[in-house]
Image (cartoon, grey):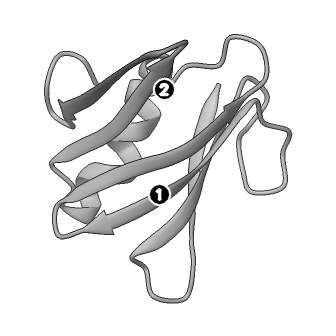
Amino acid sequence: MGAHIEWLEDVETGVLRIGREFRKHGDPYELACTVIRKGDVITLVGASCIGNAQLIAERESMRAILAPLGIRKIRWRRIKGDKCRDVEIEVAGPNL
């Protein structure tokens, strides 16, 4: 699997893509979402997933992308049925 963030014009907003066959932009992917950067935190919004692609499964790829950019935390909202919870993890922590 691989991961990539395509940063848009302002480098504060981008698109994250993750996939089993993903190595570079243009490769097939199973998960995509919007990335919003505010300082050293990114927030993932509107994730769409085919199959079982998981952000945590790509932790090494994500570390390689985010650590050099000075990103410390990743946030997202997990909605399942009528339940909602906010998730925040450290880029250097054990969960990522």
Q: Quadrant of residue 77?
A: top left
62 with respect to 69 (left or right): right
Packing grade of label 1 (10 A; few <14, some 14-19, many >=20) is many
86 with respect to 80 (left or right): left
Which amino acid, by three-letter code, is at mark 1?
Answer: Val
**Cα distance, mark 2 to mark 1?**
13 Å
Q: Which callout, 2 or 1, points at the residue further toward the start of the chain? A: 1
- The total number of labels drawn is 2
Q: Residue at x 28, y 25 (%)?
A: 96
Q: Residue at x 84, y 55 (%)?
A: 26
Q: Residue at x 39, y 26 (%)?
A: 59
Q: Quadrant of residue 39?
A: bottom left
Q: Residue 1 in the image: x percent, y percent?
A: 65, 24
Residue 51 circle label? none
Q: Residue at x 84, y 45 (%)?
A: 27
Secondary-structure class at tag 1: strand
Q: Quadrant of residue 42?
A: bottom left
Q: Residue 11 in the image: x percent, y percent?
A: 43, 80
Q: Residue 55 in the image: x percent, y percent?
A: 48, 26
Secondary-structure class at tag 2: loop
Contact, mark 2 vs mark 1 (Cβ under 8 Å):
no
Residue at numbered disc 1: 35
Residue at numbered disc 2: 55
Which amino acid, by three-letter code, is at mark 2?
Answer: Leu
Packing grade of label 2 (10 A; few <14, some 14-19, many >=20) is some
Q: Is residue 10 above or below residue 28?
A: below
52 with respect to 45 (left or right): right
Residue at the outermost bottom position: 9
Q: Residue 48 in the image: x percent, y percent?
A: 69, 35
Q: Is residue 7 above or below residue 31?
A: below
